[in-house]
Each structure stands twice: as C-alpha cells, then as structure tokens.
Amino acid sequence: MLRLIEIPLKMPEHTRIHPAMGSIFHGALMDVIAPTSAELYHHMTLRPYSQVVYWDETKHCPLWRIGTLTDEAYERLVIPLEKVPALWLKQKQYEVSLGPMQLLRQTSFEDLAAQFVKADSAPAGAEWQCLSIMSFKQEGRYVILPDIRLIYQSLLQRWNTFSDTVKLEQDDLLEQLTSHCRLTKYQLRSQVFSVNGSQIYGCEGWQRFSFFGYDMLKRLQGLLASLAPFSGVGVKTALGMGAVDTTVL
C-alpha cells in the first residue's frame, strides 16, 4: 500500500525550516523507530520510503511529509511517530513539536495502475513542482538537471522493486517513455543540498511535460508521475531530496 502523510511542525522561536534539514529529521526519525528497523534501513540501497521538510506557502506553516511504498515501511516508520509529541534534533540541539498527523493519500500499486488503464482517456502531460532539491547520479557523477530518462529510470526502479503484483518490465519501456515525453515549460534554479558535511548539487523549481505516442504509453507516463509524490525522485529521497508534487493533465 502506498501512503503519503503530513505532519505540521512547530519550530522553536527564531528558527526556520529548510528542506536541507531533511537529513537531520531522518536521523531523528531513526532514533524514534525500533533499533532493528533503523539497522534494516541503514543497509538498504533503495529504501521503501521518502521524506521531506519544507515551508508550505499555502498553509503558512512548516510541514514534514513522509511517503511509504509498503505496509511494512508504514508500520515501522509512521506508526511509532503517532505516539511521539516531539522530535529532538541532535545536530540543532533543540526540540520540534509535532502536530496532528494527516493521511493525504492512500492507494495500492494495483489501484493506481487500474486508475490509469481504465480511465476514459489518456493523460496529455504532467506538471511537477519540486518541494526539495532534486539530483541524479549517472556513471558515478551527479547530474543536476532533471533529465527525463533519469526521472523515469528512478520511478521504474522504485515501482518494480516495491510492487508485488503489477510490474513494468518491458525491455524497451524506458526508451519508449523517454522518447515520447517532451519538456514544454520550466522554471528551475540550481541549489545545493548538504548531507553529513558533503554538498550535493541539484535543482528545484517547476516544470511541465507533454506526453505523446500511443495511448497506453501516455497512460504509463501518467501512472509514473502519480507515483512520484510517494516515492520521491532521484538520489537521497530518504534524506529529504527529490520530493515533488505532481498534477497529471
């Protein structure tokens, strides 16, 4: 089951939230959950969750958003948080109060796939809004621009790793998705995300993609765009990078 939850944050006076604090919140989260769970996720290359902290301009408050891709991840990460009124941030040496948890979205891989396969018409495109800095890794180097092939590669990897039933494993699917998606509008800027003293270069902003090609291919592109808010996109999504909101058009 895919779930996206949101928690309002109450920061100490004279402090501000920033997406780069995602790694600090991740550390605090690992302190809350069972040590066996923290050890399990520490050794995972691809983790079944994403998380981000950011200032929401609409709600005028700092938020913590967590997406889980499996029931197990939800039980190991989110259920323990329901019993915690505040988090202690070791690196900052202060406490952050947690507001009421809200379940924003919940679906299954099967239901998400059925939503797009059974829709009356295929989507025409999608809009992406970055909530935190997005970056990718290719041949051992970071790629700061949101290349559509790397976006789809990231999403397909997460889908096929954590979906137990519906798989998207056709031989040339990545190439087909890439060649039938076009960036039509964007407003992006380069940014730096700090993790454990290291700097990762990436970008944030807004972009719009148009889909073309045969009907089922456009449906799959809409499907993957809808997965992105749960899974995050690119590198370090568990530490606060690559968080997005998407609107399928």
Image (cartoon, grey):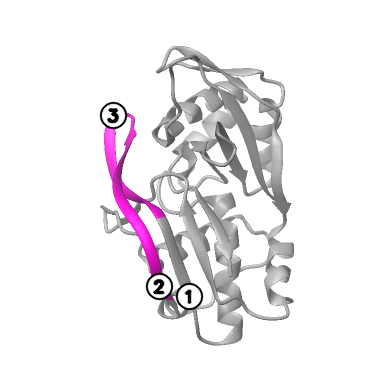
Can you tell which mark lies on residue 184?
2
Q: Which residues are magenta?
A: 182-205
Q: Residue at x 30, y 44 (%)?
A: 191
> Quarter of the image containing the C terminus?
bottom right
What is the residue that sits farthest to the top in this orientation?
93
Can you tell which mark lies on residue 197?
3
Q: Residue at x 66, y 48 (%)?
A: 70
The answer to whether residue 230 shows anywhere in this view is yes
Percent x, y of residue 17: 45, 28
> How far is the residue under mark 2 from the one under mark 3?
36 Å
Of marks 1 and 3, which one's residue comes earlier in the chain?
3
Between circles 2 and 3, the one closer to the viewer is 2
Q: Is residue 202 magenta?
A: yes
Residue 76 located left or right of residue 208: right
> How far is the residue under mark 1 from the one under mark 3?
38 Å
Q: Residue at x 41, y 80 (%)?
A: 179
